[in-house]
Amino acid sequence: MAIVTAAMAAVVFAAPASVSAADPIRIGLFAPLTGSVAAYGVRFREAIELKVGQVNAAGGVEGRPIEIITEDDRNQPEDDATIAQKLVGTPGLVLAIGGFSTTASMAAAPIFAEAKIPQISPSVTHPDFTKQSPYQFRQNNQETSLAQTNAEIILDKLKAKTVVIPYSQDDRGQFSSAGTAALIEKAGGKVLLREPVAPNSKDFRPLVSKIKSLKPDAVFLDLYAQEAAILIQQLHQAGLNIPAGGPTPLTSPQFIELAGKDAEGVVLHTIFFPGDPSNKEFVQAYAAKYGRQPDQWAALAYDSADVGIEAIRRVVKFGKPLTGEAVRDELDNGPPYKGVTGITKYDRGSVEKKPTIIIIHNGGYSVL
Amino acid sequence: MELLFSQILNGLVIGQVYALIALGFTLVFGVANIINFAQGALFMLGAFLAFSGIAWFGLPLVPAALISVVLVAALGAVLERVVLRPLSGASAITPLLSTLAISMILDQAAEMIWTPEPQSFPSPLAESRIFIGDAFVTGTDAAIFGFGLLTAIGLMILLSRTWLGRALRATSEDRDAAAQMGIRTDSMRQYSFALAGALGALSGIFVALYFQSVFPQMGLPFALKGFAAALLGGLTSIPGAVVGGVVLGVAETLASGYLGDNYRDVVAFALLLLLLMFRPQGLLGDHRLEALGGASAAAGAAPSTSLLASAGGAAVRQRVIALPAWGFIVLGAALAPLPFLSSGGYLLQAVSYGLIFALLSASVSLVSGSIGILSIGHSAFFGIGAYAVAILARFYAWPAEASLIAAIVITSFVAMLAALPLLRLSGHTVALGTLAIGQIGYLVFLNWDTMTRGPLGIPNVPAPVLVLFDNIRLVRLPQKYWLVLALVSLGLFLAERFVGSEIGRVWRAIREDRLAAHTAGVPVRRYILTAFAVSGALAGLAGGLLAYLQTVVSPESFTVELSIVTVIMAVLGGLGNMTGAAVAGFALTILPELLRGFSDWRLIVYGLILLVVLRLRPQGLLGAR
């Protein structure tokens, strides 16, 4: 039975051979498309399909169309390793975009490194990711620089001397909140409470009561949109109307949708501001295709695809053989690229983009 | 003091929600003797149908909620009729798995209908609130509390004062006797599912109001708390479910308030295990049932504790297909040339995972099948093995032989310890006990930052180094595949040897009738602990291999979902049948890969395949031993 299944699998898993110049250039995308963080992965897919659609409509890369191979990893590392193997075995595939979380991206990283296929994660902020090999690239800022902006919001914009920081208990939240708290303490502020919020935990009433008894000047919601929305609503229900700030994930329009008027006045920072005139084209195209405004995740994925496709285009244009290695070199050494999330210029796989501080006002965002 | 008061108030509100979920669960368990894992999915559907009523059809909250409750109640009844009733002659475990398959299908369908994203569910009562010092109660809280209490009282009146209630209770006490008295026990089961659906929907709507949002993944976490509350209260007791819910709610709120939110669930499930140790019948449970083989016999089954016995008490048998122990070695040798047959890594990676899960599934089948303690907590043991190897290999540079042996020994020891609170439980109760163990394992991985690096996980686990073979480093995937293949074959060989030995015979004697085994002079506890030690060793080995194969170990690999998948594998293969477990473990790991082409439909197709297989082969593909 096992042998039969294995043999069956061998047939199904076997990839077709031979590549010719007219064949499509393939880009892999792996992200959570089902499960509890699917919302972010779906933004990735939408933005990348939009970009690739635009490129193909304009004649592809030197006449060759781009094809996206999309895989759902449910944000499970064991799926990521298998998917990475599948992608590196796909003929004509020279770039992979993905990994939503650090652990998911890191599980795939060694496989891409070994196969010499560059991997761009739109979202990962953990510094360790790009240290895996020269084949890992990111689009988002590193957590260390995000923490600086977090601290700036708390100290300068919210004018808080004492703050509480509830954070989501995952790789991003843990790193971000620790960095932010350290910077606050260094600047003479006081972090009264820094508490992890467990995955799937949605009942914040005990936390709200605790925050209320500590009487802080401000709260920094180092959480994802849904948790932050529930927490801010429950804080206001408890009669605690203190200034609030949040990290980049809260720039998802979902936060305003869920929290409604309780989101008013929350100060955030982002490297993608939809109101910026230079982003108008992207925002309009995205809204026309999907009926919603793009958020930072969509923007990061859009730029990931664009940076990657431009690197591929240069390889083809310069007449070099199109391999993962050549694309990697072009990513690493390419000219600075201006996208919707700012300027991408890789330094050992990482970027440093300028954040914009924004405030939620009348159900939208305005620059603060 | 004021803080304590407001925390207790907070706990009472969330506890009332748990109580409602627990009530639905208790009803079905009492009447139909089924652990209804679909309760969480019905809960989620209730919330979403009410949401759709408001958002799509512009209905006010109350009519939308009422329509939703009626629809979900009807769905509960339909599910009982279509999916569960045809299985009533099968072993007690089969319907449980069917409810799991149903919840898988419903959860995925909800993601497709309503998108996976959370959506706003405004509560008209959120604005009104009363302050008592710093503590406060919102209108939503008052509604949850009032309606929750009313529902519980209404249910008690229904059960104690009406003919329907009497018939339900009679069915719950003794199904066969009730049938002889002219009660349509089939209809009673259907009523209990409909009532449970209604309660589930109602609690789902309350939760939606409380959080002012709905999301398709809301079912499972609340269902787990509902199970815990029901078990705390005594599983078959209606007041017990309410008390259990409130106790759980207050306890975890205090834990969250004074220890930190990350300790909330640790405390909730540890409390449950502690209680099970000292008062296995629950807070308000009836001790007399224990003499009849524990709460599992509450439905009037014959005094057999066997999971393989049907509701009527008779063991259902079918032809068993099983390899002899050496067959696993032969099979392993036959699979060895695979790396020469395929060029890409995809097949090897997928088959390696399949092999690891074959071993894990055998480990689950060993306790669940041979000894009859259905384990929905093996993710914890699997994780301990993985973390042991990851930590020893990466931070202490141990060679593969040493770190794998350490993983096996540590996991085996922990599994024995974990079995201690389970010794006095049986039947379905013990399954819920293992669920608590699995949850605690996951929470320890997530919270023990100094050891496991918490949510960051442990990346960059080095390639295995074999010190006995001239320090060879197994860097390439085919080499890792051979390591996995060799050790999985060996593990399955040993597992089959255990099951086929005298020890295995005693295990099965304990499974079939614990009391009789005890009377015959078998040291039951020692044999149960041995079974957990062996099963833990296998799970530890599987986990250790995972760490080497995957190179990243992080908590999200060891959630309750994994435990559920592995128990499905063990049952589908045929409980206690190592060959079946290995085949099912392998096939069910590869199957989602083969189904990738279905994209969004993947998990629905998977659930449907499960339902069909359970219907056709209720004793598992290769037969239970």
Image (tube, coloured by chain):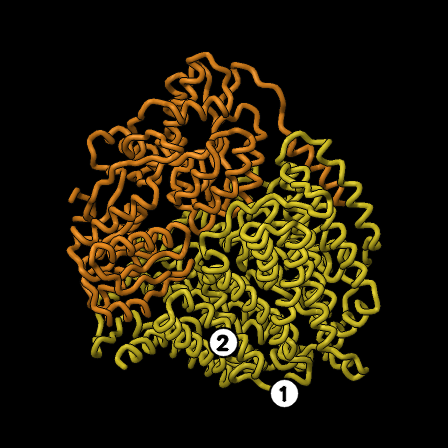
Chain colours: A orange, B yellow
Determine crowd level at label 1: few under 14, some 14-19, many 20+ residues with C-alpha closer than 10 A.
few
Q: Residue at x 30, y 43 (%)?
A: A145
Q: Secondary structure at mark 2?
A: helix
For the point 49% across and 50% down, which residue is it? B109
Can you give x and y, in whole percent of width and height, for residue B137 in the image? 26, 74
| Chain under numbered label 1 | B
Quarter of the picture containing the N terminus of chain B is bottom left
Relative to B39, A53 lies left or right:
left
In primary-sequence order, the first of circles 2 and 1 is 2
The quarter of the picture where residue A190 lies is bottom left
Q: Which mark is residue B288?
A: 1
Instruction: List x then y, in percent, for residue B57.
Output: 33, 53
Across and down, in percent, residue A306 comes to 37, 27
* Amino acid type shown at disc 2: Leu
Which of the chains bears the disc numbered 2?
Answer: B
Residue at the extreme bottom: B288
Q: Give the labeled residue for mark 2.
A: B271
| In the displayed structure image, the side of residue A213 where residue B612 appears, left or right | right
The image's mark for residue B446 is none
Residue B106 % position (x, y): 51, 54
Q: Residue at x 55, y 77 (%)?
A: B235
Q: Nearer the viewer, residue B39 or B562?
A: B562
- Nearer the viewer's eye, disc 2 or disc 1? 2
Mark 1: which secondary structure? helix
In the image, are marks 2 and 1 on the same chain? yes
Q: CA distance from mark 2 to mark 1?
A: 23 Å
Does residue B567 appear to the left or right of B326 in the view shown?
Answer: left
Image side of residue A237 versus residue A44, left or right:
left
Type of amino acid at the residue the image marks with label 1 = Arg
Query: In front: A269, or B400?
Result: B400
